[in-house]
């Protein structure tokens, strides 16, 4: 099956031929913890859930934050198959440059066991909204410098005091949604 391996370290996209079996993604990443993302229509992005704590580089596919090497395969319904996006079109979606805020946040968050993509609930007025750590990072990355510094300083304090990083991210997710226009 035709797939793409995307490596942010070398900033390369390699077309590979893989045989999808029950353990293919686990073998590819040498890990049993895999995140699956459906950012591109009719495709699945597999990533190593340990990439953040293993200090792997981050990059973006569209607006989707990816950590470490990614495996992109086609997916129609429940079936994985050949990728249908061209390498050229995929290259247009990929951005390997990330901000200093993301780099610093990754270094700090990598000291915890937080998952970037696990959704949690916050309230926007009377409505429940689902966000993730990835979204919280995005919200703070587009904020002013002082707000970014607040995020990093407070996160460092949480880590230094062995406090709950997940609770901290949930609190800042709520702050970010409160600041968002409704």
Image (cartoon, rainbow, N blue to C red):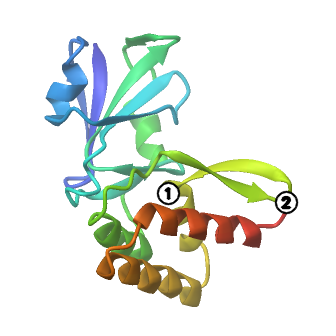
Residue bearing the label numbered 1: 133
Residue at the spot x=41%, y=67% of the render?
A: 164
Task: Give the position of the C terminus as an image quadrant.
Answer: bottom right
Task: Give the position of the N terminus as an image quadrant.
Answer: top left
Tell me how far mark 2 sits from mark 1, CA to CA.
20 Å
Locate residue 65 relative to residue 129 in the image: left or right.
left
**Is residue 109 in view from this perspective?**
yes
Count residues near mark 2 (Cα–Cα under 10 Å), then give few for <14, some for 14-19, many for 20+: few
Eye-nearest disc, 2 or 1: 2
Q: Position of residue 171 (x, y in %)?
A: 59, 68
Residue bearing the label numbered 2: 125
Q: Position of residue 36 (x, y in %)?
A: 41, 32
Q: Nearer the viewer, residue 80 or 30?
A: 30
Quadrant in which residue 139 is drawn = bottom right
* Residue at disc 2, secondary structure: loop
Residue at the spot x=39%, y=78% of the render?
A: 158
Q: Is residue 103 above or below residue 80?
A: below
């Amino acid at each position: 099956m035709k797939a793409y391996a995307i490596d942010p370290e070398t900033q390369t996209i390699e077309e590979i031929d893989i045989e999808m079996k029950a353990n293919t993604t686990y073998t590819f990443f040498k890990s049993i913890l895999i995140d699956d993302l459906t950012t591109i229509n009719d495709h699945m992005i597999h990533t190593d859930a340990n990439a953040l704590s293993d200090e792997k580089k981050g990059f973006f596919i569209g607006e989707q934050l990816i950590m470490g090497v990614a495996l992109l395969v086609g997916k129609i319904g429940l079936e994985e198959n050949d990728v249908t996006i061209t390498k050229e079109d995929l290259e247009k979606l990929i951005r390997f440059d990330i901000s200093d805020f993301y780099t610093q946040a990754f270094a700090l968050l990598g000291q915890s066991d937080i998952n970037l993509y696990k959704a949690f609930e916050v309230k926007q007025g009377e409505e429940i909204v689902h966000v993730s750590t990835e979204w919280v990072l995005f919200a703070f990355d587009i904020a002013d410098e002082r707000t970014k510094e607040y995020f990093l300083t407070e996160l460092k304090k949480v880590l230094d005091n062995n406090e709950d990083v997940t609770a901290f991210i949930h609190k800042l997710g709520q702050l970010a949604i409160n600041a968002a226009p409704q």
